[in-house]
Image (cartoon, rainbow, N blue to C red):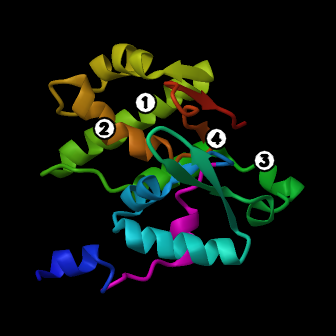
Amino acid sequence: MSENEERAWGQYAETVPDDRALSVFSGVEPYTTREVAEAMNVTEHTARTALEALFARDEVGRKEVRGDPATLTVWYRSRTGIGEVPTEDVSVDVEARVDELLEDVDVPGTSEMMRDWRIDAIRAAFDHLREQEAVSVGEFLEVVFPAHQAGFDEPDPWWEMVRPRLRRLPGVVNPAWGEDTWRYEGQ
């Protein structure tokens, strides 16, 4: 059995720091184990192990959602995990926080210039969402993509690069299940 096959069977589970797992969650938006795994770039087994540990400490909650053909487990930040936000923290400068997060974001690209273009595209999508407060995926593709293509010839691969990074920015709320409207609920 190859190392990848063994990892898939859970014989070698990577340990994920709690703060890394918690950083995936944006507000109270629920995520599947697969979404958490993709966001952390780990196996589903590793993500599930981290989520179970957080669940045991009441930092995340979980719910079984019945679907067709199977039941799905979704994870969300629990009220205990979110905690009370001190009044002085509410006035945190969103612009500075977004800039800080984008400095550390990992984007694909073979050159520094390409990576800068892609970070600019993520920032442009965030700025548009913040300004409009509710934006459909189609609107991102029609309004933001043409001016910030970031080396992509087609909008779909561009969106696949922007989407997982946009969802981690402050105030961004992913679409509800089965919908495609993103919301901004920040300052």
Say which element carries label 1. helix
Q: Is residue 75 visible?
A: yes
Magenta residues, start to end? 12-26
Q: Is residue 90 left or right of residue 64?
A: right
Which mark is first along the chain, 3 or 2? 3
Eye-nearest disc, 2 or 3: 2
Q: Amino acid at mark 2?
A: Glu
Q: Quadrant of residue 162?
A: top left
Tag 4, which secondary structure? loop
Q: Residue at x 63, y 31 (%)?
A: 184
* Amino acid, disc 4: Gly
Q: Which residue is mark 3?
A: 91
Query: In which quadrant is the N terminus drawn?
Result: bottom left
Please state which amino acid type lies under the numbered disc 3.
Answer: Ser
Quick check: 111 left or right of 99?
A: left
Q: For marks 1 and 3, give the CA distance.
A: 22 Å
When the figure is inspected, residue 143 is found, relative to residue 165, above or below; the finding is: above
Image depth: mark 1 or mark 4 in front: 4
Secondary structure mostly taken by the magenta-highlighted segment of the chain: loop
Where does the image place residue 145, in percent across and percent down from the top left? Answer: 31, 22
Q: Which residue is mark 1?
A: 124
Q: Earlier in the sequence, mark 2 or mark 4?
A: 2
Q: Which residue is mark 4?
A: 171
Residue 64 pos. (x, y %) = 61, 53
- Return the disc, 2 or 1, that comes first in the chain's sequence: 1
Dot 2 and dot 3 residues touching (CB under 8 Å): no
Residue 160 disc label:
2
| Circle 1: residue type | Ala
